[in-house]
Amino acid sequence: MAEEAAMREQAETVRRLKQEKADPDEIAKEVAKLLEMKAQLGADEGKHKFVLKTPKGTRDYSPKQMAIRERVFNAIISCFKRHGAEVIDTPVFELKETLTGKYGEDSKLIYDLKDQGGELLSLRYDLTVPFARYLAMNKITNIKRYHIAKVYRRDNPAMTRGRYREFYQCDFDIAGQFDPMIPDAECLKIVHEILSDLQLGDFLIKVNDRRILDGMFAVCGVPDPKFRSICSSVDKLDKMAWEEVRSEMVAEKELCPEAADRIGDYVKLQGGLELIEQLLQDPKLSQNKQAKEGLGDMKLLFEYLTLFGITGKIRFDLSLARGLDYYTGVIYEAVLLQQERQPGEEPLGVGSVAGGGRYDGLVGMFDPKGRRVPCVGVSIGIERIFSILEQRLEASEEKIRTTETQVLVASAQKKLLEERLKLVSELWDAGIKAEVLYKKNPKLLNQLQYCEDSGIPLVAIVGEQELKDGVVKLRVVATREEVNVSRESLVEEIRMRTSQ
Amino acid sequence: MAEEAAMREQAETVRRLKQEKADPDEIAKEVAKLLEMKAQLGADEGKHKFVLKTPKGTRDYSPKQMAIRERVFNAIISCFKRHGAEVIDTPVFELKETLTGKYGEDSKLIYDLKDQGGELLSLRYDLTVPFARYLAMNKITNIKRYHIAKVYRRDNPAMTRGRYREFYQCDFDIAGQFDPMIPDAECLKIVHEILSDLQLGDFLIKVNDRRILDGMFAVCGVPDPKFRSICSSVDKLDKMAWEEVRSEMVAEKELCPEAADRIGDYVKLQGGLELIEQLLQDPKLSQNKQAKEGLGDMKLLFEYLTLFGITGKIRFDLSLARGLDYYTGVIYEAVLLQQERQPGEEPLGVGSVAGGGRYDGLVGMFDPKGRRVPCVGVSIGIERIFSILEQRLEASEEKIRTTETQVLVASAQKKLLEERLKLVSELWDAGIKAEVLYKKNPKLLNQLQYCEDSGIPLVAIVGEQELKDGVVKLRVVATREEVNVSRESLVEEIRMRTSQ
């Protein structure tokens, strides 16, 4: 750059003057000039250094990605509506103190807003805490609602595997005082319906209960104050081997090795009704009040799931812990199972796509009088589902349309812009999805090519002759068939030809 | 409170001891006790002070409000799709520098995120700048897209009038190098369609052009560097009288009074094609290159709007300025007109519900090589529209449903929970929207009442006799009519009775 060369020359001048011990005023003048050049160059550099990107862990959605996203949303929303849910929305940020003390070790991942004078705010970390705040604030004791919105976590993103810092959650929750396990069973039915509907391949829903975990910790000899911390170690069993988790418990969390080993015996257990029955007979667990309650409810849950015909994909798993502090009863997590595997090989979980549980104490944390509203819910994590569907679409030959345009209004001759605008306006007013190229005199070939590219099925062509005859030439892009249609019946004809 | 009374008593003790000139040690002891009580009370206050609210300028949407919101969104989205738009999405926050230098005086209203180590981020202020960033980043030179999302402004909220700090924008934009004013005219057509469709009452779309404004400032004798600042004064004419705006120009912005008066003569002009023709003959404006270009394009725009048949609600208004820095050509703003007014009284604008314009330079600000992508777009501001529709619904007797449930599965006798769960599961699997009360033995009356309250049209009742006979008793809530339907034809019967 010329500026840099000039600056180097100026620096040389200053060096020379200093060496020659020239007039200090003269030196000062040249130094000032040098500094000015540096500042100038620095500012320029700033301009060029501008990075064109989205923030770390976030992404844009292109029209094609949006088309996939809307398919997934539609499947999820129709399931939520099928189960009679209402819908609510809450702000993207909450008062900071609303989120305080709800997420345990994960609280460090909360995004705070800058203090610009006013309230201290944080971006929502999930949709559950805002829901509980909403219930307490509006004194609602009974609601079945869904909420689909983005949440924010300053996590280490792994975007290729669908892990982002900004991501959607699709939450369905049932709040209210009801008979045990009926709403809980419906939440699992919903996960089952959605994952079946989306045809993502085989899946498994793991189920456990916080009371069973706590009872297990108690009978294994974990001291009370260590429950949450040991629980968060158990939570890592889906990513780490037992030996590693055990050493974290013993070395980092100072649990006695015997207690850890006792936990190790339990957390490898998984099964269905027969395991529940077995544990209800377990000499230690059956003596623990919490565990007994949890196991009793788990049995009831499995009875309801049997009525729903979905126990085939549900597994009671004592290693399922889930990190969040607010769960109080049943917890669950759905994982997709790896597709390609060797015969006889165990299906391997490729990641959690839904999770949830019962949180009977959360609303009470917000209520000024501590009134409890029992809640149970499920959150569908759709980013991973998007990734899978996106990859599948890439691999397939399927061409996905990103618009719904039924007809392009075109002309074969020049000077017909006004006629095209008049016709397209008529079509819009009649509710037809129509486009026109924004050129005064587009070539017919370009207009037809546009239809090919964007999948528009019909072209309505106006020309001198058609105008005289009061007709429009309707062309079917796929077959190149052309028919003259009277202006009055054009709308009806387009509707007929583009209805499924 | 007992603590407060005790504290007051203690304060009295201290006062008395001081008056009595008691032993300083004794006084000190009692003062310490008082301070401790104060601290205790303060901490308690802190605990109780937890405020159960959403952040300033934001709100939750209840299921009823969501039902209205979805109606409005559906109207807007179908219009955007009718015009062949694709859809995109971008993150809620951008790199801070992405937003820098785009909003002029309004930049102070941007929400920044706290620096938690990492990139400096800000919440998006509109959807236009993220769109331009998206185009430059992906080297897209040609797209017609919509984007519906929340934006954030640290403004003074006036929530009763639909002004929030978190609010939705519904943006439609056309990017690409096209023949003049064709996409611009389509944007106005879209505003016209949406506002007509929503039946919000009479409206007016004001139109102007940045080039006409700049030309006007030049011929009125405004010095170049003052253009943007004087323009933002003109922008206030919809809320302030000319005299006030004039004094802001002269006193605060040091414009010479003669120039201000000349501006005053222009900005009171409004009209249609005839005003454009008149200004094209204006001895001063017609000599200004920018103004002449702007007026020429304005004439073309009105010709296209005439073809669309919508000039009745469009007015060329020289006082329309719009604050944002990035506009370069035509600008527009739609206002709803007050409904009730005295005969002969001028219709009064009750607020802007849509706005937009042409911004040919914005994408180039992001492109490393400064490549320009001309853009024009419109943003529908739906919060005010929500407010109006919400108030209207409150005033009317219309009962709005917040779920779509077609049938409640009920039982008249006890001990039929399992049968209810089995039936509701069958219905869900068949795609029927169905609910069941989460009670083991709910009273039939309560089940019927639930249908009345939430607008569920049908009840499917199972009882001992029905189970024996292989039928379900289907009850129409509105008419209390009951028919026995065989289990096999139940789904079909429900579908038939609940299709519109």
Image (cartoon, coloured by chain):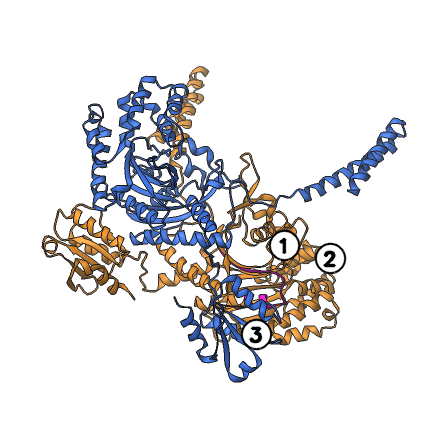
Chain colours: A blue, B orange
How much space separates mark 2 and mark 1, taking CA atoms? 21 Å
Q: Residues within 10 Å of mark 2 (few under 14, many from 20)?
A: few
Dot 1: element: helix
* Residue carrying label 1: B362
The amino acid marked with disc number 2 is Asp
Percent coordinates x, y for residue A152 in the rendering: 46, 41
**Which is more foreground, mark 3 or mark 2?**
3
Figure check: A385 above or below B483: above
Q: Amino acid at mark 3?
A: Ser
Residue type, mark 1 in image: Leu
Subunit that carries the residue with mark 3: A
Asked if disc 3 and disc 2 are in contact, CB closer than 8 Å, the reply is no
Q: Residue furthest front?
A: A343
| Chain letter for mark 2 | B
Residue situated in front as seen by the camera: A438 or A463: A463
Of B332 and B474, the residue lying toward us:
B474
Work out whether residue A352 or residue A380 is closer to the camera in this orientation and state it.
A352
State if disc 1 and disc 2 touch (CB < 8 Å).
no
Residue at 43% across, 40% down: A125
Q: Residue at x 56, y 68 (%)?
A: A447
For mark 2, what is the residue? B224
Residue B342 appears anywhere in the view: yes
Q: Is residue A20 above or below residue A189?
A: above
Residue at image position (48%, 52%) is A65
Q: Position of residue A275 (x, y in %)?
A: 23, 32
Residue B495, given in percent of the width and then of the height, sits at 26, 62
Residue B182 colored magenta? yes
Quadrant location of residue A128?
top left
Q: Which residues are magenta?
A: B169-187
Percent across and percent down for residue B310 are 53, 73
Nearer to us: label 2 or label 1 = 1
